[in-house]
Amino acid sequence: MLPCPSCSKKNRVPDAAIGTPRCATCKAPLPWIADAGDASFAEVAEAAKTPVLVDLWAPWCGPCRTVSPTLERLATQMAGRLKLVKVNVDNSPQLARRFGVQAIPTLILMDRGQEKTRQTGAAPEHVLRTWLERNIGVAAP
């Protein structure tokens, strides 16, 4: 359950869906933040029509814990234009190997299932915002 940033009503946001989630009450775009693993990644991330920011992280990683709230803020600010998919590399070793993860956090921006660009390491919010805006072609509010 997720509160709508516009009207504060709670909404259920599925990990995978056709289109992008909207508030059932006010119809505003909702932040789309989902978890995925080896078994669910294709459905949750690759099938998305919206650009997907994949956060490859681990719970023991300090920089991962530092950047996570920033990514969630950006996903909220870019609701309807970006989906954040979090992948715990400890629980998803196949995805870590597939993407050649050698350091975490690794952030991968995907468009229609294809990797567009990536960034490794924690970065400040303004750097991540600029990186996303440049690569998805829309300015965040």
Image (cartoon, rainbow, N blue to C red):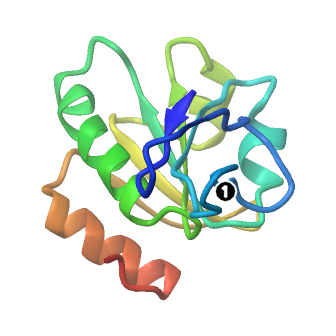
Residue 5 left/right relative to 11:
left
For the point 41% across and 52% down, the residue is 5
The residue lying at 78 percent from left, 41 percent from top is: 16
Q: Nearer the viewer, residue 4 or 91?
A: 4
Where does residue 81 sit, x and y in percent of width and height? 56, 70
8 left or right, relative to 26: left
Residue 94 percent location from the top left of the image: 69, 25
**Left or right: where 87 falls relative to 129:** right
Q: Residue at x 77, y 52 (%)?
A: 46
Task: Tell me the residue that label 1 is attached to.
Answer: 22
Q: Position of residue 138 (x, y in %)?
A: 46, 86
- Count of marks, rendered view: 1
**Residue neighbourhood size for the residue with mark 1, other residues' Cα within 10 Å, grouped as few (<14), some (14–19), many (≥20):** some
Placement of 123 over or under 88, stated as above or below: below
Kindly identify the residue that appears in the image at 28 percent across and 11 percent down: 60
- The residue closer to the viewer here, 82 or 4, is 4
